[in-house]
Image (cartoon, helix red, strand yellow):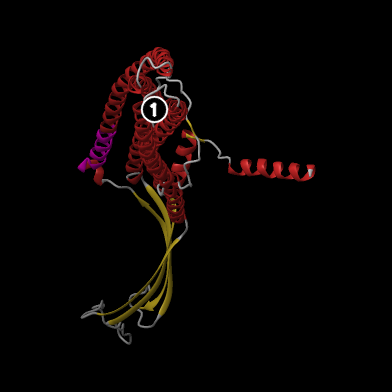
Amino acid sequence: MRSFILYMGLLLVLNRIGHAQTPLSLEDCYRQAEMHSPLAAQTRLIQEATELQIKILSSNYVPQSRLNGQATWQSDVTSLPIKLPNFEISPPPKDQYKLTLDLTQTIWDGGVVQKQKAVALANQQAEQQKVAVDLYQIREQVSNLFFGALFAERQLHNFEILQKELRAKLTKTQASVQNGIAIRSNVLSLEARLLEIEQQLLETQKRRTAALEGLSLLTGTAIDTNTPLVALPVKTQNSEIVRPELRLFDAQKQNLAVNEQVIKAKNAPKLSAFATGGYGRPGLNFLATSFQTYFIGGVQLQISLTHWYTKSQGMEIRQLRANQQRVERQRESFLLATQVRLANQRREVERLQALVESDRKLIDIRSTIRKASESQLDNGIITASDYLTEVNNEDTARQNQILHEVQLLQAQNNLRLTAGN
């Protein structure tokens, strides 16, 4: 029998452990929401696209080949107006054919490919930083849902305590009515208040369920009503702004700077080797009348002069630098707006901290008055309505404390989100 009791006790403990829910923190929700977001896959896709682009650019160092074929008929051909005795120079045929294989090998391209690779990497950095900015915006949605669920959770806990106290008082009052000490209306007043609490419980449970469902969709994880939410106060002294938008502005400026180098490289001298092998009629000897094979090879130097008199390079560079200044102004504007928002949020945190402190004092006073009225109700000095007035006053004070505490936690978190810490 003793072994059976131990066995059943062990099953009960294991059952409780199995049903215990792991607390869910706000940071967990942030991390899971970012991982679950379709935006997260873009980072990998951007990197893959950049790697392919760099491979394509690297192929420019490989010898470039081209196969050409041509068949023509022309109305006249080259001939020599010279007649020699016993010797006749036949003109080439008017139908001519040519098949060639052209090879080109870059020796020096002015650094174009190298700079284009740098542009590809700079584009990757900027695009990935855009994704980081979009992912960061998800945190605000997660925060609103999380603190909405947390507020409802704490309200439910408060309602359950109040419900338990009033049920105990109702049982005691019912006994007093049966003994002729209290009047029937006291029982009815307590029953009516309990019904109101049940309605508030139902409404709050619905709000909490809706908020948790929203969190489940954003995070991609199942979050039920048994999952406890954990939100700890955060330090708000650090005022340094490290938002992902700032890194995006820096990446955009770097991208423009690299593009400036590409413009200069495009107009730099270029050196390449070339070779052409062919078969046709005529060959290199244009007076030949038979099909021949031939070969041409050499080195080619190209120096662009157009940008010197059109000033195109200078204009393109000025355009890029104007865009850099534009990005810098956007960065300054963003910093100013963020600093203004941080200042307002700091004042909000201070206001809520003061309210929470006064809520505690008010609850102590309301609790003392409620306890005194409870004793007066037991002694028949006041009615249940008078007692419930003090109960409601204390409950209102506690509800305000719950609201202000959750608002303070959210304000501290919003301050941290705004700063990017």
Q: Residue at x 36, y 20 (%)?
A: 387
Quadrant of the rendered image containing residue 80: bottom left
Q: Does residue 107 lie above or below 122 as drawn? A: below
Q: Start and end of the magenta stretch? A: 310-324
Question: Hey, which residue is sitting farthest bottom in the picture?
Answer: 86
Q: Which residue is mark 1?
A: 410
Question: Closer to the camera, 226 or 378?
Answer: 378
Q: Is residue 72 left or right of residue 358?
A: left
Q: Position of residue 186 (x, y in %)?
A: 36, 26
Main SS, magenta region, reads helix
- How many numbered dots are placed on residues in this image? 1
Q: Quadrant of the C terminus?
A: top left
Q: Position of residue 211 (x, y in %)?
A: 38, 40
Q: Does dot 1 land on a helix, a strand or a loop?
A: helix
Q: Is residue 111 something one can see in this rendering?
A: no
Local crowd size for mark 1, using a 10 Å CA cut-off: few (<14), some (14–19), many (≥20)? many
Question: Hey, which residue is sitting farthest front in the picture?
Answer: 180
Q: Quadrant of the N terminus?
A: top right
Q: Does residue 124 lie above or below 143 as drawn? A: below
Quadrant of the rendered image containing residue 204: top left
Question: Closer to the camera, 128 or 414?
Answer: 414
Residue 312 lies in the magenta-colored region: yes
Residue 363 lies in the magenta-colored region: no
| Amino acid at circle 1 | Gln
Q: Position of residue 25 (x, y in %)?
A: 49, 34
Q: Is residue 22 left or right of residue 26?
A: right
Q: Position of residue 244 (x, y in %)?
A: 39, 33
Question: Closer to the camera, 48 or 396?
Answer: 396
Q: Is residue 369 something one can see in this rendering?
A: yes
